[in-house]
């Protein structure tokens, strides 16, 4: 069973995903890192060079590649991955989806000094993305407040996952 972490940029998907995968003894994949490896461009540079539409298509292919290789991963998705090409439905059908919920303000505070996220360069942009995607994010099997400490969030995820039958 795959475990998918979704949410805004800066919600902690990668950090939480790595810790969660360690605790569960599962492999970890970050779709943005996967795309970076395959294209030799980080997502921000890819979007600047080829546009967002091309990035969303390569994200969909990355998801397809991940699903074809195995089904026992913790996967940190890009913030927009669930919102395009019915990817949320694919995630919901092939694993447990966990929405790491943070406010736009917290998201922006965590990522504002990075120069890797061209779609999140201002609080207004992050707020816009949040409002555009929140209904999709809320389709997740589990919604977790991702504001507390790393260990607390990971332990809460494990607790909530244990209530699901595989």
Image: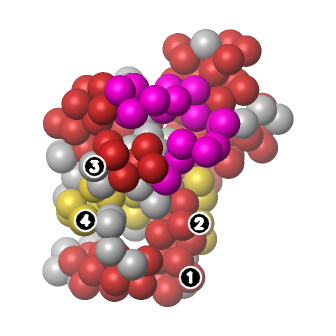
Q: Which quarter of the image is occupied by the N terminus? A: bottom left
Q: Which residue shows up at 27% across the image and 80% down it?
A: 156
| Residue 22, numbered circle | 1
| Residue 151, numbered circle | none
Circles 4 and 2, Cβ within 8 Å, touching? The answer is: no
How many C-alpha atoms fall within 10 Å of the one at disc 3: few (<14), some, or many (≥20)? some
Looking at the image, tell me whether mark 4 or mark 2 is earlier in sequence order: 2
**Is residue 120 in the magenta section?**
yes
Q: CA distance from mark 1 to mark 2?
A: 8 Å
Does 157 sit left or right of 18 as displayed?
left
Looking at the image, tell me whether mark 3 or mark 4 is earlier in sequence order: 3
Q: Which residue shows up at 70% across the image and 24% down it?
A: 46
Give the labeled residue for mark 4. Answer: 145
Is there any visible trace of residue 65 in the rendered image?
no
Tag in front: 2 or 3: 3
How many C-alpha atoms fall within 10 Å of the one at disc 1: few (<14), some, or many (≥20)? few
Give the labeled residue for mark 3. Answer: 103
Tag in front: 4 or 2: 4
**What span is colored magenta in the figure?**
110-126
Which type of secondary structure does the marked residue at label 3 adopt? loop
**Is residue 151 in the magenta section?**
no
Please identify the quarter of the rendering in which residue 69 is found. bottom right
Which type of secondary structure does the marked residue at label 1 adopt? helix
| Residue 28, numbered circle | 2
Question: 16 or 63: which is nearer to us?
Answer: 16
Looking at the image, tell me whether mark 1 or mark 4 is earlier in sequence order: 1
Q: Which residue shows up at 32% across the image and 43% down it?
A: 104
């Amino acid at each position: 069973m795959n475990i998918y972490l979704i949410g805004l940029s800066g919600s902690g998907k990668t950090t939480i995903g790595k810790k969660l995968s360690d605790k569960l003894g599962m492999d970890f994949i970050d779709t943005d890192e996967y795309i970076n490896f395959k294209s030799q461009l980080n997502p921000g540079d890819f979007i600047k060079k080829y546009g967002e539409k091309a990035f969303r298509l390569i994200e969909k292919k990355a998801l397809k590649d991940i699903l074809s290789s195995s089904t026992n991963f913790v996967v940190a998705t890009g913030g927009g991955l669930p919102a395009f090409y019915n990817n949320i439905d694919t995630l919901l059908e092939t694993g447990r989806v966990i929405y790491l919920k943070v406010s736009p303000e917290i998201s922006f505070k965590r990522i504002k000094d990075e120069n890797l996220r061209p779609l999140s360069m201002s609080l207004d942009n992050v707020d816009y993305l949040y409002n555009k995607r929140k209904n999709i994010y809320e389709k997740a099997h589990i919604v977790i407040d991702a504001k507390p400490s790393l260990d607390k969030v990971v332990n809460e995820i494990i607790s909530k996952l244990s209530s699901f039958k595989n």
